[in-house]
Image (tube, rainbow, N blue to C red):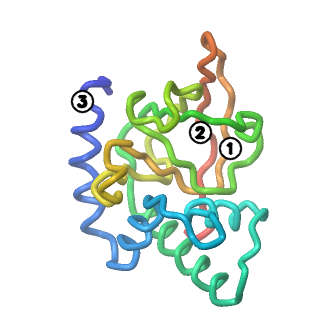
Amino acid sequence: MPPNKVVQILREESRKWIRKLTTEEKRAITKYTYNGKDKDGLRLFEKINGYLGGYYQPISQSEGEMLDYMVSNIQNGLFKNNLQRDIIVYRKDYHVKDLNKPIDKLLSTSVTTKGVIGGVPNVAIIIPKGTSGAYIELLSHIDYKKQREFLINSGFNLDKISDDRGLLIYKVRGESNETK
């Protein structure tokens, strides 16, 4: 897909996907994109991904129940999308070695190099048609719409293809099926 058309095409496809979502799935995805910090200094997406990865323990039973509820709604929502074509996404990753392990968290990426948080991307990921994930700009919190985010569902592996002058290129292998 031509880089200058990717946002327009994915935005249109995401409109169709969003119509399939429940109110709670939409709400969970929107809350995931908001980067406000809780009293403990952590943002919701950090808690969710830490929880999925086994390195964050909820501070209470109610927080654990909330995280389970959010994760379930986000993952179920992402499973409702059917990526129509192969795409390339980008991210600035400070823990690149973790990409060589199974990805057990939600993975935020940008469909443009300009949307990457933290500056110039150091990772490009080829996402094959049919991969579990979705372009979530239309559900993103207003402050983060310019990230042009494609959120990949948990439960997949990345194969490293090459290192092109500091840009590590990976391809998604496997499909998340935790709730399929």
Residue at the image point whose x is 63% and y is 23% from the top: 168
Q: Position of residue 87 (x, y in %)?
A: 42, 34
Q: Give the residue pinned by disc 2.
A: 172
* Kind of element beneath mark 3: loop
Q: Position of residue 113 (x, y in %)?
A: 42, 28
How far apart marks 3 and 1 lie (CA) works out to 27 Å
Q: Residue furthest top?
A: 165
Q: Quadrant of residue 41?
A: bottom right
Identify whether 2 is placed above or below 31: above
Mark 1 residue type: Asn
* Kind of element beneath mark 1: strand
Q: Quadrant of the C terminus?
A: bottom right
Residue at the image point whose x is 43% and y is 68% from the top: 31
Mark 3 and mark 1 lie on one chain; the one further toward the N terminus is: 3
Q: Position of residue 144 (x, y in %)?
A: 36, 50
Mark 2 and mark 3 lie on one chain; the one further toward the N terminus is: 3
How far apart marks 1 and 2 lie (CA) works out to 6 Å
Q: Give the residue pinned by disc 1.
A: 157
Closer to us: mark 3 or mark 1? 3
Proximity of marks 1 and 2: CB atoms separated by less than 8 Å: yes
Pick the front one: 10 or 43: 43
Q: Quadrant of the N terminus?
A: top left
Q: Give the residue pinned by disc 3.
A: 5
Q: Quadrant of residue 55?
A: bottom right
